[in-house]
């Protein structure tokens, strides 16, 4: 959890320059609301570090535009405008303003939009977008890789169950036994492992896989 703490600290630091004094409390409130949520914290850090309009502003709400396989398209609703961010465990990408409503074809396909028009239409009415809910509280989302119920984990996710022994896939010896190696060192071996897993049938995420997290929980010191 230290990583999350230092991320919150970095956001607060960036806020000092990005947010006008009168809005600091509101900005801080939103940070508290998402204090355990990596996806939202990634968004906030990106926003406050690279203010899209290069002038004081703050995020009032975060809304969910689309999500698939651990990739989130979120709208940061600010005092001045609203901006799209594409976020996953791989990183954050800024995608312009919500009212521009632009997404390239690959992403339209990825999120299952019929066409750009359908996406624009959804963006046009930001009040209809649901609030983004903190993932750690959402039982239908893998707390580590953010796959939703029924989706495959990202390979290497510590929550994924081994289809051979029912243990923890990144801990049990099955992956070495299946490949006939002592260690997995090359990209080639990983690709081979993925093929073997697919053949065997990978275990998709379900809420009963949630580990009994010894997390900080609500009501802890917040710095
Ligand atoms: Zn996972
Ligand atoms: Zn196993």
Image (spheres, rainbow, N blue to C red):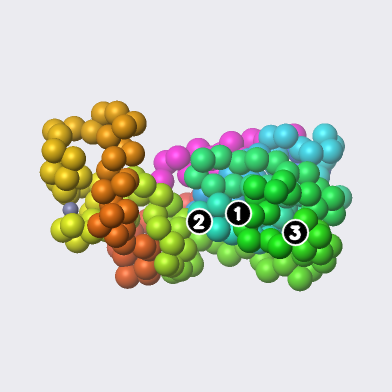
Classify 168 as above or below 18: below
Viewer-nearest of labels 3 and 2? Answer: 3
Mark 1 → mark 2, Cα distance in angstroms? 9 Å
Mark 1 → mark 3, Cα distance in angstroms? 11 Å
In the picture, the disc for residue 110 is: 1
Quarter where residue 150 is shown = bottom left
Residue 4 lies in the magenta stretch: yes
Residue 31 x, y percent position in the rendering: 62, 52
Q: Residue at x 79, y 68 (%)?
A: 127
- Mark 2 nearby-residue class (10 Å; few <14, some 14–19, many ≥20): some
Residue 54 x, y percent position in the rendering: 82, 34
Tell me where the magenta segment starts and ends, as one range: 1-17
User: Circle 2 sits on which residue?
Assistant: 69
Classify 71 as above or below 56: below
Residue 130 lies in the magenta stretch: no
Looking at the image, tell me whether mark 1 or mark 3 is earlier in sequence order.
1
User: Circle 3 sits on which residue?
Assistant: 115
Q: Is residue 30 visible?
A: no
Q: Is residue 36 visible?
A: yes
């Amino acid at each position: 959890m230290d990583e999350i703490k230092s991320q919150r600290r970095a956001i607060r630091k960036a806020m000092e320059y990005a947010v006008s004094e009168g809005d600091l409390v509101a900005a801080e409130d939103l940070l508290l609301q998402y204090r355990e949520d990596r996806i939202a914290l990634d968004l906030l850090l990106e926003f406050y570090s690279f203010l899209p309009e290069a002038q004081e502003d703050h995020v009032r709400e975060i809304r969910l535009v689309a999500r698939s396989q651990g990739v989130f398209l979120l709208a940061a609703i600010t005092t001045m405008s609203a901006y799209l961010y594409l976020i996953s465990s791989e990183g954050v990408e800024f995608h312009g303003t919500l009212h521009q409503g632009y997404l390239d074809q690959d992403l339209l396909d990825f999120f299952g939009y019929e066409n750009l028009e359908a996406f624009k239409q959804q963006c046009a009415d930001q009040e209809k977008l649901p609030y983004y809910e903190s993932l750690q509280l959402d039982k239908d989302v893998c707390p580590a890789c953010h796959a939703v119920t029924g989706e495959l984990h990202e390979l290497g996710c510590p929550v994924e169950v081994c289809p051979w022994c029912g243990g923890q896939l990144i801990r049990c010896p099955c992956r070495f036994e299946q490949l006939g190696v002592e260690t997995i060192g090359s990209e080639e071996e990983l690709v081979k492992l993925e093929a073997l897993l697919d053949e065997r049938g990978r275990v998709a995420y379900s809420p009963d896989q949630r580990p009994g997290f010894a997390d900080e929980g609500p009501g802890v010191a917040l710095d």
